[in-house]
Amino acid sequence: QVQLVESGGGLVQPGGSLRLSCAASGRISSIKNMGWYRRAPGKQRELVTAITSGGDTNYADSVKGRFTISKDNAKNTVYLQMNSLKPEDTAVYYCNAAVIVYGVGIPHDFWGQGTQVTVSS
């Protein structure tokens, strides 16, 4: 019904930057929220940042001031600009969207396949 496709991960040195993208497609009536989660090795998945349909954002304390979430409503795409990356940012990053599918009245969660971000010298 709905697909989320992520791109932009990779290997970067500490202090570097990466930009992740996540494009949603399919039977989308509207998108309530979009966000990014991550799972580091040996740790539970955690919320990194999210943005509502109205543009309100929230960030994990660990990324405040370094990461910025933004979206392009026309393209159903959310972006994550990551600056001043640290080794502890190394994780698989997952895109999430709360989507109202055509013909279904309540939002459902959809997930991307994940993209690896590795911060290492």
Image (cartoon, grey):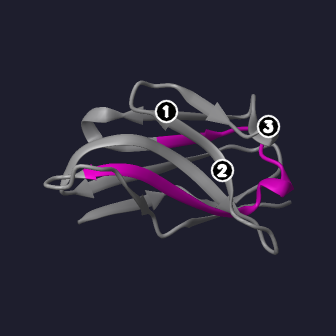
The quadrant of the picture occupied by the N terminus is bottom left
* C-alpha gap between disc 1 and disc 2: 15 Å
Q: Quadrant of residue 58?
A: top right
Element on which disc 2 rests: strand
Label drawn at residue 39: none
Q: At which x and y percent is residue 26?
A: 21, 59
Label 1 close to label 3 by CB (< 8 Å): no
Residue at 71% across, 38% down: 83
- Which residue type carries mark 2? Leu
What number of labels is visible?
3
Q: Does the rendering let one see residue 117?
A: no
Label 3 sits on residue: 61
- Please tell me how crowded label 2 is: few (under 14), some (14-19), or many (20+) other residues with Cα within 10 Å: some
Image position, residue 116 (x, y; %)? 63, 66
Nearer-the-camera pick, 49 or 15: 49
Q: Residue at x 47, y 58 (%)?
A: 7
Query: Along the polypeptide, which appears first: circle 1 or circle 3?
Result: 3
Q: Which residues are magenta?
A: 79-100
Q: CA distance from mark 2 to mark 3?
A: 10 Å
Magenta region's main secondary structure? strand
Q: Which residue is mark 2?
A: 47
Q: On screen, 41 above or below 61?
A: below
Give yes or no for contact between labels 2 and 3 (Cβ–Cβ under 8 Å): no
Among the 4 quarters of the image, the one containing residue 80: top right
Q: Which residue is mark 1?
A: 70
